[in-house]
Image (cartoon, helix red, strand yellow):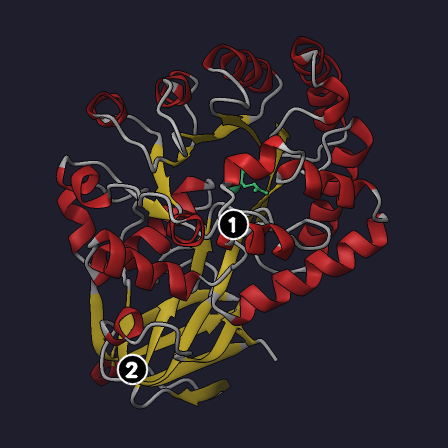
């Protein structure tokens, strides 16, 4: 089965060669072809170029993209979309003056979500999560990472991971699963953190690996959650079991977690709202990509990751939604791209690179998605007729997507 997209006003993020990730000044270059064609064969990108070189294909379905742009779908490398219920009561509490920390201290926050999840059946959790995944796909997400971490008991963590596994089986987009048992200290271990860490490393990690339920291991390395030493232990054990790290660090406090991530060759270190110069230095010339989560900064009113400083220092950067019920209840990557431009002063080229190729790298999917490259999945965003790719982040909050194609098939 072949599909030919013709008369594409501009084909965005065209990479002849495979790239792993873009760093520093490279991020300001977004290669495109104006007046282009694109051929999809068996779900993969098989050819593209200028319209004047468009091949005649007799058996192809033809789609006329006059006036419209085509981009690779967004790669959302950090989400928690498998959760139960919502937390809008806490949202109102914050408007009325409580802080995110105050809410967590009185048993709300992650523990509130854990309680709701523990009381939700696996089937119901699947139904709630599937709806969120369908919604973000319509918003242009074509590859996603999903974390556990709202279970906080062996049984409930396995329930979350099984839901992620089912999503992997039932959806055609690439999905990566991350075990985040070290997301918060469960109520039952309030005065006995050591035992919970023991449970994590001795029972939970081996069981998750035995059931092949996770690709990555994550820890919330933060004051009041898991210390640098505990993070190190959990990453070490995770890696021994074949789980590569992707960690939450420097969200509220910079306590040295970035160095641990780099030491254990994390795919990514995420959040980084609080960045010290030494954290930037540690990340230079490593395989670990920093990931900013502008939706979380927006929603909680905390600082934005210093993207300008990081990119100008030569670092790579990916951006993701952090879609979760407490700190970022939105999975809209278009909003994330806009916010990166508006609040973090990233150029549209940098933001689009951060949300595609660099996002793909942050979940180990750079061979499959993230650019218009022959052999990659034909996961595509077809825009409405718009003036340029700059218009997308500029005209924030509006929907510029006409249709999404996954493996070349239109999503209905
Ligand atoms: O990435 N920071 C830790 N975890 C999530 C938020 C968790 C929650 O509030 O439910 C995050 O922001
Ligand atoms: Fe997160």
**Image-quadrant location for residue 287:** top left
Provide residue 181's location: percent of width, then percent of height. Answer: 65, 28
Provide residue 26's location: percent of width, then percent of height. Answer: 17, 47
Q: Assign ligand 1 to one image quadrant.
A: top right
Q: Is mark 1 within 8 Å of ligand 1?
A: no
Say the numbered circle drawn on residue 94: 1
Q: Is residue 187 above or below residue 202?
A: below
**Image-quadrant location for residue 374:** bottom left
Say the numbered circle drawn on residue 54: 2
Return the residue nearer the eye: 246 or 344: 344
Q: CA distance from mark 1 to mark 2?
A: 56 Å
> Can I make out residue 315 in this image?
yes
Q: Residue at x 24, y 80 (%)?
A: 53
Closer to the N terminus: mark 1 or mark 2? 2
Provide residue 297's location: percent of width, then percent of height. Answer: 38, 48
Q: Residue at x 30, y 76 (%)?
A: 395
Return the residue nearer the eye: 209 or 257: 257
> Can I make out residue 42 in this image?
no
- Quadrant of the image containing the C terminus: bottom right
Residue 297 falls left or right of residue 190? left
Q: Residue at x 70, y 54 (%)?
A: 167
- Quadrant of the image containing the N terminus: bottom right
Q: Is residue 7 above or below residue 104?
A: below
**Image-quadrant location for residue 52:** bottom left
Packing grade of label 2 (10 A; few <14, some 14-19, many >=20) is: some
């Amino acid at each position: 089965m072949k599909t030919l997209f013709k008369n594409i006003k501009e084909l965005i993020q065209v990479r002849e060669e495979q790239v792993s990730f873009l760093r520093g000044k490279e991020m300001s270059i977004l290669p495109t072809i104006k007046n282009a064609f694109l051929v999809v064969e068996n779900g993969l990108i098989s050819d593209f170029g200028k319209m004047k070189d468009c091949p005649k294909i007799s058996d192809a379905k033809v789609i006329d993209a006059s006036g419209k742009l085509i981009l690779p779908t967004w790669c959302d490398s950090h989400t928690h979309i498998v959760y139960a219920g919502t937390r809008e009561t806490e949202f109102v509490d914050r408007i009325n003056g409580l802080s995110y920390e105050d809410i967590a201290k009185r048993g709300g926050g992650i523990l509130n979500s854990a309680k709701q999840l523990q009381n939700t059946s696996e089937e119901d959790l699947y139904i709630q999560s599937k709806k969120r995944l369908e919604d973000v796909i319509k918003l242009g997400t074509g590859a996603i990472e999903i974390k556990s971490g709202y279970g906080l008991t062996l049984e409930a963590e396995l329930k979350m991971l099984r839901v992620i596994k089912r999503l992997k089986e039932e959806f055609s987009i690439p999905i990566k699963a991350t075990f985040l048992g070290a997301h918060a200290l469960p109520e039952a271990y309030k005065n006995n953190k050591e035992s919970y860490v023991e449970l994590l490393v001795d029972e939970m990690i081996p069981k998750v690996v035995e059931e092949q339920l996770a690709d990555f291991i994550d820890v919330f390395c933060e004051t009041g959650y898991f210390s640098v030493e505990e993070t190190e232990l959990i990453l070490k054990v995770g890696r021994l079991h074949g789980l590569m790290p992707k960690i939450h660090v420097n969200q509220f406090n910079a306590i040295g977690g970035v160095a641990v991530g780099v030491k254990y060759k994390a795919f990514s270190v995420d959040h980084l709202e609080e960045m010290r110069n030494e954290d930037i230095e540690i990340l230079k010339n490593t395989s670990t990509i920093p990931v900013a989560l502008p939706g979380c900064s927006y929603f909680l009113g905390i600082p934005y990751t210093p993207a300008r400083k990081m990119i100008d220092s030569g670092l790579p950067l990916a951006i993701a939604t952090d879609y979760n019920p407490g700190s970022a209840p939105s999975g809209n990557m278009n909003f994330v791209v806009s916010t990166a431009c508006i609040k973090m002063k990233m150029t549209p080229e940098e933001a689009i690179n951060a949300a595609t190729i660099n996002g793909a790298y942050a979940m180990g999917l750079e061979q499959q998605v993230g650019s218009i490259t022959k052999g990659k999945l034909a996961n595509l965003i077809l825009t409405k007729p718009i003036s340029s790719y700059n218009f997308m982040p500029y005209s924030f909050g509006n929907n510029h997507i006409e249709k999404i194609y996954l493996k070349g098939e239109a999503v209905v």
